[in-house]
Image: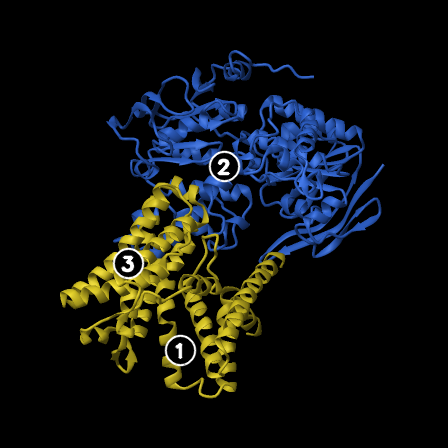
Chain colours: A blue, B yellow
Amino acid sequence: MGILTIKNVEKNFPGVKALSGISLNLESGKVHALIGENGAGKSTFLKILSGVYEPDTGVVELDGTVLHFKNPQEAIEKGISVIYQELFLVNELSVAENLLLGRLPNTFGFVNGALVRQEAEKLLTMFCEDIDPQASVGSLSISHRQILEIAKALSRNARVIAFDEPTSSLSEREINKLFEIIRDLKAQGKIIIYVSHRIQEIFQICDTVTVFRDGQIVEHFNDIKKTDMDTLVTRMVGRPIRDIYNYETRPQGENILSIHGLIGPGLSEPVNLDIRSGEIVGLFGLIGAGRTELLKLIYGAETVTSGTMKINDVQYPQASPGNSIRRGIVFCPEDRKKEGIIAIRSVKENINLSVRRSFSRWGIINEAKETANAERFITALGIKTPTPNVKIENLSGGNQQKAIIARWISEDVKVLLFDEPTRGIDVGAKSEIYRIILNLAKKGIGVLLVSSDLPEVIGISDRILVMSQGRISAEYPRGKATEEEIMKAALPVEKNVVACN
Amino acid sequence: MKISLNRLSKHLWEDSGMLVVFVILFIGLSLFVPYFFSWVNMLGLMLSVSMVGMVACTMLFCLASGDFDLSVEAIVAFSGVLVAVLINQTKSIPLGIFLGVFSGALVGLINGTIIAKFKINALIVTLAMMQIVKGLTFIISNGSAVGIYESKFFLLGTGRTLDMPNPIWITALLFVIFGFLLNKTIYGRNTLAIGGNKEASRLSGINVDRIKIIIFTVQGLVSGFAGVVLASRMTSGQPNTSQGFSLDVISACVLGGVSLSGGAGTITGTLVGVLIMGTVQNAMNLMNISSFYQYVVRGLILLVAVLFDQFKQNQLKRS
């Protein structure tokens, strides 16, 4: 039996008290949940465990031995592995090379290719996924990359394994698989830390739960059965949240976006789709169903093969994102780090990136209007940032997402295309984002929202579309479909079950 | 009061560490190197960095957008020779200058179009273009210097305005123009955005290809103009001039804190980088240090500057 002890850890950043007075005892053979809103201090806590940051005061002990890490490598050597929400893989290398990076089997520096493949296959079998060890990581889907990241950490024989939002882009089946693995690790006596925004999930898999708020521990239950979801949510946000979707009916107008016979890469059948002004259409599908591809085709980020698109009954040539934005169609991408934020630029720059065009004259930017716009949305959306001039990479994931939404609602929007807007975001921020979406719909904006979170799709949409294998496989009005029906429509028709185990 | 002073110095250090280094260096050299702090020497120093300074203005944009341009040295030589040949043949100074500058812009346009539209690495494209343009320079000059017979043309490079050599005025003007472009226009902000994250910029409606083409075209245009000024200063077009000039310009930018991976760079930083390079060289000349040693020293300065910057970044992240 082992125990990871955190004693009175404190960490400050310029202008922010990230953590204070954190003390925890985490026993082996258990899964420990850490929950809290964005910016509550969970990520900082994980970064201290993994050697990215050094605490200002306080110590971390494993079985009574004080641990000091100068860098993440040292933490890994001493048995602590953290699997982050943002994935750290080398896209250009193969799956096998990534798995064994830093300790490739070799003879006098010459890599033994056969052995690499063999080792990698061994590591991957436990996941029962059709991942080719030879494929380059860049060609894998996000879910497969994440599985790879998990396999990599597991292969290091870590004593402590921390998962940061491991399920945020996994399908139902993959999640079940992950839980099996976690239960396995638990039985082996590992200390498992599990950070997630999906509260239902932690009741399935975790044994203890600790709630973070504003850099402090506000609640700890040594037995998760002694509490319930409502209590945890209340403790997390400091106020009770009744219905996080805040759904209300609203008048809907004419078709604002009409798509007819759309064909393009990623789609297997022509897509027909209408969105009325003021309507929220939820688009559900598993990863790889063609949801992102469809949004990018509508937006003009990918080239359409054929089909017509009309906005307010006026046909528009699908040419480029810039063209779509000027017609009032905007797109909020799924992969925040790769396609959303400009990490090393300020929050203000990120918010004004697109809209500054309309503030400016003769290409000269209007500093005053940009500052006012940034401040307006920082307040309106509750973006937590010391100043608008802080680099956006210093913000938590949820606040980065809000800044990206601010970028788009600064525009004169008619149709908003959202790709997984609440992925990896806590309940409080989710609820705020739903409120933002509803308010936009009330103003007559049409919303097309892609999500792999079923309760979200059911909770927020006026109408639900389901995609499977590159086509729209079902359509339901609000309240006319159960989770089971939707899931069934989303599953691939032919080979929906791959034999495993 | 003490706290605010502390914060001020901290800000100065974090935002413009190189400026502090330059000021200290400058004061030190003024105190210890004879003749360094004299008007004549100051003018000489500024004149010596004017070429690097002009092209550094546009190289800043190129690097900030995440690209690279090795062809500038070839463009400088090419337009210098071209302007010499054209002035001699047509007797028209304006036409010579125009075509000299235009040829530089054309090379830049080709660079930018290939890089943006065919998605080929800028290092390779500009390396190839450097060879091609270098070859063309030798072809039109027959491999030797081309003397210019219209002495009015020399006013551009050797004349003075308000007792200051014209190239210094030109360089200063370019710094003002490109500083304005970088900080106050959509073009400048989009350049930084593209360098920070190309795909996010594209999805935000920025026409990435067009901006890249503009960046390279302007780079070629300014290099062409620098070549014309140089020809005017030397009263001839020199095909063998400016060997290694591209890397001098890039070194100065990097010294001034422009990120080679794109997304970060300031005009004051670039100016400071240019001045540090020039000041050190000037001081070494005054101290009669052989040019063989000067190369070693300049290389060391660049290395130390980059290491120092890295150290500062880590310190910022840790604190």
Residue under disc 1 on the same chain as residue under disc 3: yes
Secondary element at tag 2 = loop
Mark 2, Cα crowd under 10 Å, few <14 / some 14-19 / many 20+, is some
Labelled disc at residue A335: 2
The crowding category of the residue bearing disc 1, from other C-alpha atoms within 10 Å (few below 14, some 14 to 19, many at least 20), is: many
* Residue type at the position of mark 1: Leu
What residue is shown at x 37% (from left), y 80% (from top)?
A: B44
| Residue position marked by numbered label 3 in the rendering | B139
Most foreground residue, A28 or A281: A28
Report which quarter residue B55 is drawn in. bottom left
User: Measured from the top left, where is residue B286 in percent x and y?
Assistant: 46, 83
CB contact under 8 Å: marks 2 and 1: no
State the SS at label 1. Answer: helix
Residue type beneath disc 3: Ile
Mark 1 or 3: in front is: 3
* Looking at the image, residue B15 lies above or below residue A378: below
Which of discs 2 and 3 lies nearer the camera? The answer is 3
What is the distance, in whole Å, between disc 1 and disc 3 at their CAs? Answer: 34 Å
Q: Chain of mark 3?
A: B
Tell me which chain the residue with mark 1 is part of: B
